Amino acid sequence: MDEIQVAVEAELARLRAENARHGTVIKPGPLRPAVPGGFTSDDFAVDEKAGTVTCTAGVTRPLTRTRTVTFGAACAAARCGKDAPPPQTDGR
């Protein structure tokens, strides 16, 4: 089967499911940390009402209007979990 045939078959299957009133769901892959041993978004608590994010060490910072968070110097002193490496002093 070439790519066009595969695409057509996939669309037909989707239409059959839709006509039978079945919803289609794409299961997302597992979250992966940006760096090995790092954190994912699931490791943080987001409080939408307060507009804050709390890390695993309990440090809370505000969300910006673009929905980013900077923990900065707070991370240098915080120990995040039992297997956390010691804070780095070389700025990396």
Image (cartoon, rainbow, N blue to C red):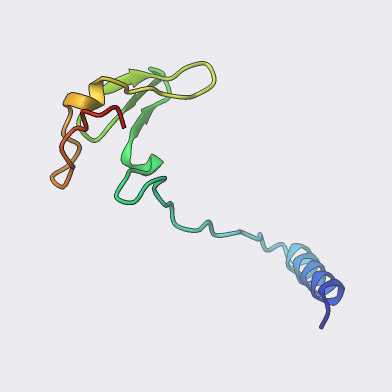
Residue 37 falls left or right of residue 31: left
Q: Position of residue 54 (x, y in %)?
A: 30, 28
Residue at screen point 16% across, 34% down: 79
Residue closest to the far bottom: 1
Residue at screen point 37% across, 46% down: 35
Residue at screen point 72% across, 62% down: 21
Residue 91 falls left or right of residue 67: left
Q: Is residue 41 above or below residue 32?
A: above
Residue 68 falls left or right of residue 3: left
Residue closest to the far front: 90
Residue at screen point 43% across, 20% down: 63
Residue 65 falls left or right of residue 12: left
Q: Within the image, what quadrant is residue 75 found in?
A: top left
Q: Position of residue 58 (x, y in %)?
A: 21, 28
Q: Is residue 21 above or below residue 83?
A: below
Q: Is residue 58 above or below residue 32?
A: above
Report how many numbered discs are placed on residues in the image: 0
> For this rendering, which residue is in front, 39 or 46?
39
Q: Within the image, what quadrant is residue 16 found in?
A: bottom right
Q: Is residue 36 above or below residue 62?
A: below
